Amino acid sequence: MDFIPRPKPAITGKESLHVEDAYHGYFDSAMGRTRTVLNDIDLVVSRGEFVSLVGPSGCGKSTLLKLFTGQEIVQRATHFEVLGRLPSFPDRTRGVVFQNYGLAPHLTVLRNILLGLEFQSGLFQRFSREWRKKAREMARQYLDDMRLSDASNKYPPELSGGMRQRVAIAQTLITIDLFGMPDLICMDESYGALDASTREDLQIFILKLWEKYKKTIIFVTHNLEEAVFLGTRVIVLSQFWTSDLPAEQQEGSRVIMDVPLEPHAMSTEVKQTEAFKDLTKYILDRGFNPKHRLHVAAFNADLRHPNAFSTLTKEQCAAQPDSES
Amino acid sequence: MVFGRVLGVLPIALLVGLYIVASQARHKVNPDDKLMPSLHQMYGQMTTIITVPDKRSGKNLFWGDTKASLKRLGLGIGIAAAASYFIGIFMGMFPGFRALLGPMVTGLSNVNPLALLVIVLVALGVGESSKIFLIAFGIGIPMMRTIAGMAERMPDELTVKALTLGASQFQVMYKIVAPQMLPRLIDLIRVSLGAAWIFVIAAEAVAATEGLGYRIYLQQRYMNMALIIPYVIYISLLAYASDLALQGILKFPCFRWYQKCED
């Protein structure tokens, strides 16, 4: 019997992400051709999911986020809908927290945090004293939550990496409180520069915010423990896989694992349990090991989330009869 | 620190001393020597021009020259700065503008402004506008290229972040990019000051009725080194002072962030 790929979930049009057969790459002058970075990405994310996106270095996580925000436009795909449409330009519906901060160096920490409010407030609000007061109070609250109160009048170049990261996080999250935007938040290793204690604080902070507003979050991280703790779903994007196609068509990354997790936030104590540690180790062994390349036909075992699916052609798994069906 | 200062003064003092010795030696041979006037002669010439008004026009030539030159310099730099700031930012931010103006600006930046001087004089006349144009053109075009390049190299993250925070293209320009270009513009003016002074003096030498450069070239006819040498020193001091003033602007609290950016 032929291999049956995991079927596509029912699409209602209300999904945050609906990506099917997406390919993206960059021209490599050394190779003289386009090098594929994302190879046949299939992904459906419902509204309000907290997706942890992990994968080995260089697997194209940041590239995928660029496609979501609209910094780049996907090169080939049958479906690429973010909040219902193909993103062509960054706008306020899709927020982003960059790995290297993206702060305005000429504005103080407080002004940086108020930036989104300044951009989005209407004329009426800008001249309303009460609204301005509310915005400032909100910003102060965020400064407190982010442990930045002492730095509010400093400029980004005067801050440490971890502090800059917290400013960048506050910049994006504060707009949710005041405007209910963005609907999709892309966080690219946003917690990478934080120390352990601040990191745990901010993990709880983002979970609270997520429980309150139920926005879709794509959280890229290198810390598997963090990924499993935060997400309602862990997606592993990896370049370590094989298929029966010629080698040059096996370039780039695919979604090789998609694991459902608790659909609600958990206490930090869960990190100490055996099940938590086992899952972390399982993901590490299966998804991050260049010597252990899974065949595309064997992905089904790891594509466990109800929204997970894969579109495969017969050529991709010609030699390998399905072992999982 | 003090020792360092002394060390720095040493070669200057040596140079001045050498001049005095040489000047005295020449005066011993020929008391009417004009080539290397003594410090006393220079002092006499300078006090005369500073304190005694010109017989014919009744004007104070020294202050008149200073005012005329600084006005030309200021207007030229001002126009160059304003044009390069606005056009440069537009070129850096919008590919359409870059495509439209880029080749022309690159081409113009290769035109030698001094070679252009004659054409400018014929086209704009010998009045103030030709001199101001020369300065503005001479330093404005390279400044425009530099500003455009800096605005273009602005990190992508910054623009994208602002856009995702709800900024319009226009807001990105005037809230994110333009303020960051301001201290860079001041730095650029500092770098361009030397060239600006060259253009002022050159333009005044060719066609003017007053100005520091005009005075020097006028006195050249009489070989009046006793006035020319102090004037050259005075021009150098003015250039140094204008550089210090611009440095002072960069020390304002609103540019504190710029001092911290070490890129």
Image (cartoon, rainbow, N blue to C red):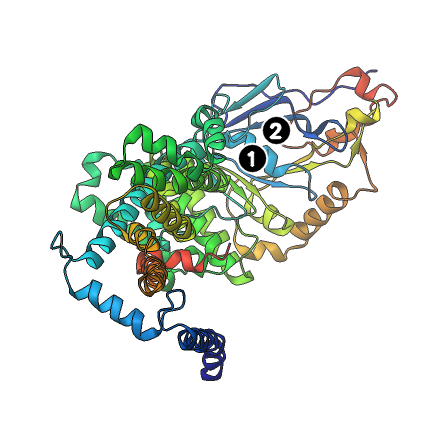
Point out the residue furthest to the right here. A319
Residue lying at 48% horizontally and 77% vertically, measured from the top left = B14
| Number of the front mark, 1 or 2 | 1
First reached walking from the N terminus: tag 1 or tag 2? 1
- Asked if labels 2 and 1 touch by Cβ distance under 8 angstroms, the answer is no
Name above or below for residue B125 compared with residue A292. above
Q: Nearer the viewer, residue B90 or A323?
A: B90
Res. B147 in view: yes
**Near-viewer residue (B209 or A322):** B209
| Mark 2: amino acid | Pro
**Relative height, residue B109 to residue B12 (above, below):** above
Mark 2 — residue? A306
Q: Which residue is mark 1?
A: A65
Residue A174 vs residue A230, the one in the foreground = A174
Circle 2 marks a residue in which chain?
A
Residue A227, image x and y in percent? Answer: 60, 46
Please provide percent x and percent y for residue A60: 65, 36
Q: Residue at x 61, y 29 (%)?
A: A306
* Quadrant housing residue B87: top left
Q: Residue at x 13, y 52 (%)?
A: B56
In the image, residue B61 lies at what x, y percent? 20, 56
